[in-house]
């Protein structure tokens, strides 16, 4: 049981603190490569900021903050930027 708890904590930390910002950093730094250390550092800062802002906006609308809703919000944030990138690439062709 403690191993499952540790894995959930590590997975949740990566999901909240890295994934949305990493997606956004690839969108912002598309012309240059800042290096992995800089990209991860910027990703953590962006992830925390964006996740907090989006959660607060959903809270203002009336959506309760719980693990399931937070997961869907993070997946929504993470999927917007790759879809925008694909739309931009298809529009150029």
Image (cartoon, helix red, strand yellow):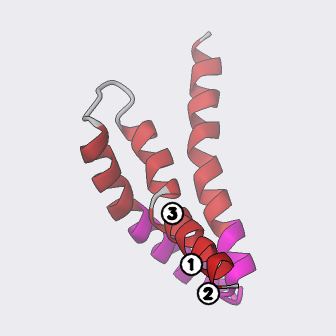
Q: Position of residue 81 (x, y in %)?
A: 56, 44
**Observer-nearest of 51 and 1:** 1
Q: Residues within 10 Å of mark 3 (few under 14, many from 20)?
A: some
Q: How many marks?
A: 3
Tell me where residue 19 appears, x and y as whole percent: 52, 55
Could you tell me which secondary element the residue under label 1 belongs to?
A: helix
Q: CA distance from mark 3 to mark 2?
A: 23 Å
Q: Secondary structure at mark 3?
A: helix
In this view, the mark in front (3 or 2): 3
The disc at residue 14 is 3
Q: Which mark is residue 55?
A: 1
* Position of residue 57 in the picture relative to residue 29 (left or right): right
Relative depth, front residue between 13 and 54: 13
Q: Residue at x 67, y 58 (%)?
A: 76
In reply to whether residue 52 is colored magenta, the answer given is yes
Residue assigned mark 2? 59
Magenta segment, which residues? 47-72
Tag 2 or tag 3, which sits nearer the N-term? 3
Q: Residues within 10 Å of mark 1 (few under 14, many from 20)?
A: some
């Amino acid at each position: 049981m403690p191993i499952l708890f540790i894995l959930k904590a590590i997975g949740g930390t990566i999901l909240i603190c890295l994934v949305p910002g990493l997606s956004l950093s690839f969108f912002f730094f598309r012309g240059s490569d800042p290096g992995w250390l800089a990209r991860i550092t910027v990703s953590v800062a962006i992830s925390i900021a964006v996740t907090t802002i989006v959660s607060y906006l959903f809270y203002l609308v009336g959506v309760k903050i719980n693990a399931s809703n937070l997961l869907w919000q993070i997946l929504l944030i993470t999927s917007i930027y790759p879809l925008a990138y694909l739309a931009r690439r298809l529009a150029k062709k």
